[in-house]
Image (cartoon, rainbow, N blue to C red):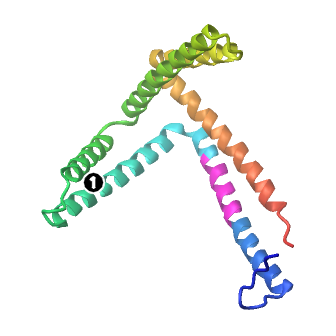
Amino acid sequence: MFFYDSGSQESFYEMQNRVNRKLKAVRRGGIVLAVCLIVLGIALMICPQSVVTWVERGIAMVLGLTGILEVIDYFTTTALFRQSFTIARGVGNLLIAVLLLMMDTQTIMTLLAVILGLMLCLIGVHKMDFAAKLNYFRVSGGQASVLAGVLTLIVGIGFLVSPLLLTSVATMLIGLYCVIGGIALLAEMLSFVSL
């Protein structure tokens, strides 16, 4: 039989107090996260383009700072350990950041919707191809894969045909999901009981 000895005997009440402190910290963090989700969801449903603009600016700033740090890293590293990919990645991040800051929101939303549409079309075709292979080898479950592939392909074509409309709808759905998820998380955190 194995007994663990930590070297110090902690009483049950000390352990309970430590666990309760951690639970309270988790509860506070969960409540803050839930409120943030609810606020983000409401903001996405009320003014989706403004939120997308702020997210775009934030991503541009992070990419720009990352690019600057990578360029600095390249020039401060000794010549023996320099990697050319570091400077290429840094300059690429800087270029993407500048493009994001210069483009308007509708252009970025359209570009992202077209990229998403192409990806969904490829995923849909892949799912239908997978279903055909399942069917060829007489493996059950191919019908669900065909249905998922067709639905994914339809949504992908929808993004390609009308990128701004579907982007707005998707933003509204994400906002609704954030609000519902935030409310559920808030209810869970408020029902958290200490030992």
Along the viewing direction, whichever of 51 and 157 lies nearer the viewer: 157
- Give the residue displayed 67% in from the left and 50% down from the top: 38
Instruction: Give the residues in magenta.
Output: 29-40
Horizontal and vertical percent position of residue 41: 63, 44
Total marks in image: 1
Left/right placement of residue 2 relative to residue 130 reads: right
- Give the residue displayed 54% in from the left and 29% down from the top: 168
Left/right placement of residue 37 relative to residue 183 reads: left
Horizontal and vertical percent position of residue 76: 18, 67
Q: Is residue 133 above or below residue 79?
A: above
136 magenta-colored: no
38 magenta-colored: yes
Q: Is residue 150 above or below residue 69?
A: above
- Classified by dominant secondary structure, the portion drawn in magenta counts as helix
Q: Is residue 159 visible?
A: no
- Give the residue displayed 64% in from the left and 18% down from the top: 145
Secondary element at image label 1: helix
Q: Name the quadrant of the C terminus.
A: bottom right
Q: Name the quadrant of the N terminus.
A: bottom right
Horizontal and vertical percent position of residue 37: 64, 51
Horizontal and vertical percent position of residue 65: 31, 57
In this view, which residue lies farthest toward the top? Answer: 136
Where is residue 79, by image quadrant?
bottom left
Left/right placement of residue 58 relative to residue 140 reads: left
* Badge 1 amino acid: Gly
Residue linked to disc 1 = 67
Instruction: Say few, some or many: other residues with alpha carbon within 10 Å of mark 1 (under 14 / 14 to 19 / 20 or more).
Output: many
In this view, which residue lies farthest toward the front? Answer: 1
Q: Is residue 49 visible?
A: yes
Along the viewing direction, whichever of 171 and 20 lies nearer the viewer: 20
